[in-house]
Amino acid sequence: MPLKCLRGADEIYAFDMESNGAWEAFRKENAKSGDLRMPCCGAAVVLRTSPLGTRHFAHKRTGPCETAPESKEHLLAKRLVIDGMRRTNWDAKPEQDGATPTGERWKADVLATRGKARVAFEIQWSRQDGAETKRRQERYVASDIRGLWLFRQLDFPFADKDCPAFRMVFDEKMNGVSVWIPSPLWHPDYAKPEERDADRHWSQRIELSRFAEGAVSGRLRFAPTLGATLPLDVMVVKTVCRRCGKETRIVVKMVLAASRIFPTHPDIHVSLPSMDRIPGGPSIVAGWLPKGLLRRYGVGEVKVRRSGLEVEKRASYLSNGCVSCGAMQARWFEGNIDDDPEVALTVDVVFDESWVLHMPGTRNWRRWWFDES
């Protein structure tokens, strides 16, 4: 059930006939001439419309052709990708064949081209294992084509820069298809079946034609926060210094508010302990939060100090200090503070790979994001 057929050497596309009248006239013309052929086997063609309203071509008679039929959802998805491409300066054609330099064949559901650039959209409605996805992607790479995958199944490579892959969902009520981008909480192995569609697992849902349009227009980005300047919210609580007895404020949380720069992107949490484990981390924090700036907000200097507590094994670590006397405010006592953290100040921070790549956990930032603006 392709979107194209052949008339001699020319490719004919069903979506080029945008009105019902044009489609019906073309149907009558083909009934008289009978010169349209299926690209898969050369068989005669009939014109049909799927239950979802997608115009397509089909074999006139059942024959020996071994090409697997496509579902009505697959056809609709291909048509929506092409609709999106038509709003760009890219040329898109369905069901395009090609080969790698070594002769390995490939066939793209939709191939978009602009000059020498090529993007293959793969609509994977049927199940496909990871090894097959990797093998097919490698063929595209060898052919200098960027492959983009849309999966109906839930287990797909959802955080792979080299193999862009996303969930594709058909909405029967809306008669449409949308693309779902997972949140940092999503993992197919851990999500309960009844919770797999829950909002907390999916940070973005984009109508397919709009997604396809944006994918080739610079709006689909991997790890957009890397190298960006992000606001860092510094959260503090009040405590009483055990040395001088005066009130001071200490840093207990820091949040890189990525969502303010990249809407729907999850915020990224950092802490003094996590920065302490990064090479050069204490110096980086000192650059973010200089002593004079912290003092203006009643917060003591943040620097490496040696603990005097046996329970902390008298270790040296990045710690808070008293704003009055500078004494170390040991991390051991933070669990006894009942005060709720509040944002005391916000500073701009460059999310630089020189330290980011050393952070534990990457799921909050090493991910795909779509600019919906």
Image (cartoon, rainbow, N blue to C red):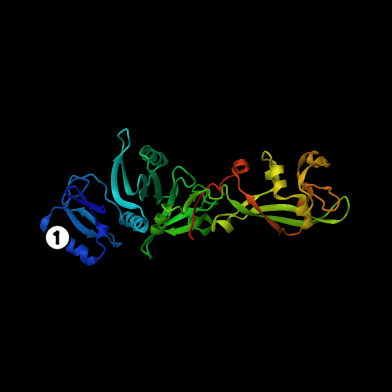
For the image shown, how many numbered marks are present on the structure? 1
- Residue 179: quadrant of the picture: bottom left
Residue placed most toward the observer, 126 or 158: 158
Image x and y of residue 117, in percent:
37, 45
Tell which residue pokes out farthest to the front in this image: 115
Q: Is residue 113 above or below residue 136?
A: below
- Three-letter code, disc 1: Glu
Secondary structure beneath disc 1?
Answer: helix
Q: Which residue is mark 1?
A: 29
In the rendered image, is residue 170 in sight? Answer: no
Residue placed most toward the observer, 202 or 327: 327
Image x and y of residue 64, in percent:
18, 44
Q: Is residue 113 above or below residue 24?
A: above
Image x and y of residue 62, in percent:
18, 50
Q: Is 98 left or right of 264, judged from the image as shown?
A: left
Q: Give neighbour class at mark 1: few <14, some 14-19, many 20+ (Cα, 10 Å).
A: few
